[in-house]
Image (cartoon, grey):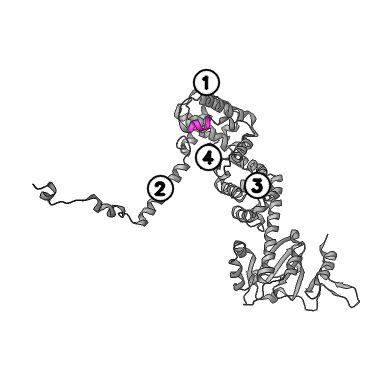
């Protein structure tokens, strides 16, 4: 008797389609789908816990509605408007507008929130607290109103909504003013990177943007002294600063790290990441911020100078080790590294490309290297220190010394090395005198590198350079 397959002449074997099924999509298509899923998950991760943030127009409308009616005895809000009111607590429609959170109207707003309470308000109020942590430190009464309602509602919460539970169970961590210190201690004790600080309470990464975590970072860096300050810990701090995305916080934390000697074992990470976050230390304007207090700006300036010294030290080593091998000149200039304000290189395109290929200095070369029009093999190191400009060359020759006001050389329009050698070959800054045992000195001129030139240069330094 014939089987059904024979009658229909259909001999389907699922295994025959296995290869086709496995190769239905190209590897490129699979990669695109994978990247799309990653992007989607990143978007989801950026959404606030507890729901979508209200549109700015709605926040503005509720803000004005509250100001217009908050003194009316019969005035009330619906739960929807009260939810928006919470997000309006720190809203400021114009630069001269009053902020409810820092005004005498906060009592009335808290009463409306209480009258129309929903447990989801815990999330919104907690976000308001962390966003405004800095300013609330100066408003004890207002801060107490906010933390009191949060403490009361979190202690009473007995349901199972996951995002609210994460906050209600940890609310004691956010009530005291020294909360960031406690938070930083827990991160270190649990070996959680600062860049993953949100994972301590299992919330989304976007909370790292808040003021609160700037204080956590400050305490984390301070307390790291008692831990193993390894490259992973330091890298985590800089990754946090990228996520936190505040120039002021970056300046303060980067400066804190630079000014503390215990981080010196990770100096290469410090140099690279600080320049990326703030800027080259020779660009002083990039190390200024109007939001910094006077004392904070002084700390940043101290760090800028220290970082500049670190970079200048490296440039001197590169010049006298890679462009020319001269251990004596390298050793001499490193003695004055703390007094050097700026360093520039000048030479042909070949030397420029050579420096660009040295990874440790590559990103700093463009601002510091000045290409000459003529293709000479000689390269110059131009050192700005105190009231002088010192010019060294890769051909041993002589050191040229200028007072800053005498150095009228446009480094952006150099033709050749001769533009940097304006003194006559007979104009010496110091040379052995015709009288035995004496040295003739002048404030500007040349110093040859013949013989024991260091002693002659020392004599010049003692007379003109040192205070």
Of marks 3 and 2, the one in the foreground: 2
Residue occupied by mark 2: 37
Q: Residue 16 at what x, y percent from top left?
A: 24, 53
Q: Residue 369 at what x, y percent from top left?
A: 63, 67
Of the image marks 4 and 2, the number of the one nearer the N terminus: 2
Q: Nearer the viewer, residue 111 or 433?
A: 433
- 10 Å neighbourhood of mark 1: few (<14), some, or many (≥20)? few
Circle on res. 199? 4
* Label 3 residue SS: helix
Of marks 4 and 1, the one in the foreground: 4
Rendered residue at 37%/57% (across/down): 28
Of marks 4 and 2, the one in the foreground: 4
Q: Is residue 53 above or below residue 117?
A: below
Residue occupied by mark 3: 252
CA gap between label 4 and label 3 equals 24 Å
Q: Residue 448 at what x, y percent from top left?
A: 78, 75
Q: Residue 66 at what x, y percent from top left?
A: 51, 29
Of the image marks 4 and 3, the number of the one nearer the N terminus: 4
Of marks 2 and 1, the one in the foreground: 2
Q: Nearer the viewer, residue 263 or 243?
A: 263
Q: Nearer the viewer, residue 397 or 321?
A: 321
Task: Please give left or right for residue 394 compared with residue 203 in the image.
Answer: right
Residue occupied by mark 1: 73
* Label 2 residue SS: helix
Magenta stretch in the rendered image: 163-170
CA gap between label 4 and label 1 equals 44 Å
Quarter of the image containing the C terminus? bottom right
């Amino acid at each position: 008797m014939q089987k059904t397959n024979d009658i229909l002449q259909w001999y389907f074997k699922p295994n025959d389609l296995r290869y086709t099924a496995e190769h239905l999509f190209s590897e490129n298509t699979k990669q695109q789908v994978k990247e799309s899923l990653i992007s989607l998950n990143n978007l989801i991760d950026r959404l606030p816990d507890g729901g979508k943030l209200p549109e700015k127009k709605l926040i503005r409308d509720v803000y004005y509605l509250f100001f217009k009616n908050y003194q009316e005895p019969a005035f009330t809000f619906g739960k929807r408007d009260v939810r928006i009111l919470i997000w309006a607590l720190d809203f400021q429609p114009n630069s001269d507008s009053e902020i409810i959170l820092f005004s005498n109207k906060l009592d009335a707003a808290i009463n409306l929130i209480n009258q129309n309470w929903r447990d989801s308000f815990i999330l919104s109020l907690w976000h308001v607290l962390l966003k405004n942590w800095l300013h609330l430190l100066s408003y004890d009464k207002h801060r107490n109103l906010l933390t009191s309602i949060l403490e009361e509602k979190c202690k009473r919460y007995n349901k199972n909504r996951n995002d609210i539970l994460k906050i209600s169970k940890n609310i004691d961590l956010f009530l005291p003013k020294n909360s960031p210190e406690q938070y930083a201690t827990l991160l270190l004790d649990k070996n959680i990177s600062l860049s993953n600080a949100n994972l301590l309470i299992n919330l989304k990464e976007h909370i790292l943007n808040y003021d609160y975590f700037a204080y956590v970072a400050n305490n984390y860096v301070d307390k790291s002294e008692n831990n193993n300050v390894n490259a992973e810990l330091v890298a985590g701090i800089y990754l946090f600063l990228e996520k936190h995305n505040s120039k002021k916080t970056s300046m303060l934390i980067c400066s804190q790290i630079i000014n503390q000697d215990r981080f010196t074992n990770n100096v290469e990470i410090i140099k690279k990441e600080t320049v990326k976050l703030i800027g080259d230390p020779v660009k002083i304007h990039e190390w200024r911020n109007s939001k910094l207090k006077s004392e904070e700006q002084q700390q940043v300036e101290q760090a800028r100078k220290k970082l500049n010294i670190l970079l200048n030290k490296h440039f001197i080593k590169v010049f006298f080790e890679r462009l020319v091998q001269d251990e004596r000149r390298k050793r001499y200039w490193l003695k004055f590294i703390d007094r050097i304000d700026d360093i520039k290189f000048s030479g042909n395109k070949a030397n420029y490309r050579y420096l660009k290929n040295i990874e440790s200095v590559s990103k700093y070369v463009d601002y510091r290297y000045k290409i000459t029009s003529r293709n000479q093999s000689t390269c110059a190191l131009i050192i700005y220190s105190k009231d002088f400009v010192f010019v060294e060359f890769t051909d041993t020759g002589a050191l040229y010394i200028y007072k800053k006001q005498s150095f009228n050389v446009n480094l952006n329009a150099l033709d050749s090395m001769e533009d940097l050698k304006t003194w006559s070959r007979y104009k010496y800054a110091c040379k052995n005198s015709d009288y035995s045992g004496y040295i003739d000195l002048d404030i500007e001129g040349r110093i040859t590198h013949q013989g024991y030139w260091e002693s002659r240069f020392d004599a010049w330094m003692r007379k003109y350079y040192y205070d």
